[in-house]
Amino acid sequence: MGGCSLLLTSFLALPTIVQTVQADEVGDSSSAILQELETLRKRIEELEAREATARKKEAKAEAGASVADSEQPFKMKWGGQYRVNGYTADDDMGDDPTSARVRIRQSLDVQFDENLSSHLQVELGHTSDNITTTNNSSRGTNLAVRHAVMAYNFQPGESNLTAKVGILPLADHFGDVLFSADWDYNPVAASVERESLFVDGDDVRLFAATLNEGDEVVTEDDFTHIQFDYRWPVTPALKLNAGVGFAAVEDVFGDSRDHYNYGFSGEWQLDEGMLLRGFILGSKTEKQLVGASSDGEGVAVKLELAIPDVGLDIMATYASGDDDGSGFLPVMALAPTNGYWGYTGLLTVQGPTDTGFDGDSVNISNNGYGLTSVQLRYRRPITEKAALYLAGGWYGNTDAPDGREDRLGWDSLAMVSYSLNPYLTVDVGGAYARLEDSVSGYWQNANGGADFNQAPGTDRDKYAIFSRIQIEF
């Protein structure tokens, strides 16, 4: 840049030099030339100094812009879910619980740059000591951390190779039947996910989770879960998933035992907007975890048809069982956790019935005793802001021990949802179920070996009337 300026200045000065030489032909021409050259040198130095100053200002401005860019505030998102559940229930056992439960979830998401992000969610659970604060003296404070995620994307915008660590919400890729998606499954974990590994649109995930560490210096008393999933689009209309999971679980004697789940799931977009979903899963469980004489083994199958134009969903499930609880078992039967895998409100639960009267809800295998279900769901708008939800299901074909029924019963649900605005929704409804004595609630496997909700030969009716007011943003 400096050389170009010097050449240009010299060229512009030539006419002046020529004129000077012509004017001083009778005088001392040599002296005049030297004087003009000295003037030219001074002008060149002045121009170079100005150019250097301009370059410094430009460099300073660029550096300032870089600093300003690096000092831009983080991108933050403030979200949450505020909920009040009210209900009264009658389970024909004299308890008749009636309550109003407040639950608040508040989330903070921070995007530090294109690579690094974090997610935090705190939760205020059900409170019962409400005179001055939300502290429950019998159970301690209910304010707790639900999610705490650190995420780093190594290849943003390309393959999205992302690593996460912390208290992670881990989603189930098999219809919420294996561990329980992001409702009740947020272990301390590390995960790696990669998009478009082999073909465009595929997705690979591997995670390792600690559900219960027990005593840190003892290895055998942990509950760990390792899961691998691979999802790929075979065609635009057909998507498949393959997964295998391993869990090392402490038995009643404090020793670590092995459990496996494995299988395939998929969804197929049919003509006229219909969607067909399904899976086939297997399990293998060491006998000490279920208190059986031999290792547990089983298979589970689901077929589901969604017809959006009608608002109708139809689902059939089957899980093999044994009278010692050693049939098909998902991880959630050992955890024990639950998920929104079904359509109904008491033997399976939805958001508004997932509260203080959900103790009869079961996982897909009825804790290893086996289960067949046939469920229907009808969802339809009533007005621009209101929608109707109807569901019913039959649950049976369980291999319970002698003296118990081979069916769990049947369940029904009716609910109306009204959206006051895009964030605020009010749900009001009722549920009724006929429950036989072979119901083994999802929580019954907590201490090793499944149990039942009621004594042999005892059946009962259960109903609930409920409401939910919820802001979600």
Image (cartoon, rainbow, N blue to C red):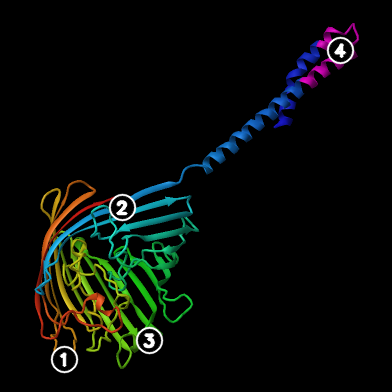
Sequence order check, earlier mark of 2 and 1 = 2
Q: From the viewer's perspective, tell me whether residue 201 is left or right of residue 161.
A: left
Q: Secondary structure at mark 4?
A: helix
Residue at image x 18%, y 84%?
398
Query: Upstream in the sequence, badge 1 or badge 3?
Result: 3
4 or 3: mark nearer the eye: 3
Which span of residues is magenta-colored?
Answer: 20-42
Name which residue lies at 53% across and 39% down: 68
Between the C-alphas of marks 2 and 3, the distance is: 41 Å
Q: Nearer the viewer, mark 2 or mark 4?
A: 2
Depth check, mark 1 against mark 3: the one in front is 3
Q: Is residue 277 left or right of residue 194?
A: left
Gap between marks 4 and 3, in whole Å?
110 Å
- Quadrant where the N terminus sits is top right
Q: The disc labelled 1 sits on which kind of residue? A: Asp
3D distance between C-alphas at marks 1 and 3: 28 Å
Q: 137 or 82: which is nearer to us?
A: 137
- Give coordinates of residue 360: x percent, y percent: 18, 73
Q: Which residue is mark 3?
A: 253
| Of the image marks 4 and 1, the number of the one nearer the N terminus | 4
Q: Residue at x 27, y 68 (%)?
A: 267
Q: Position of residue 53 (x, y in %)?
A: 68, 28
Q: The disc labelled 3 sits on which kind of residue?
A: Phe
Depth check, front residue: 278 or 299: 299
Please name the residue that numbered disc 2 is placed on: 80
Q: Which residue is mark 4?
A: 32
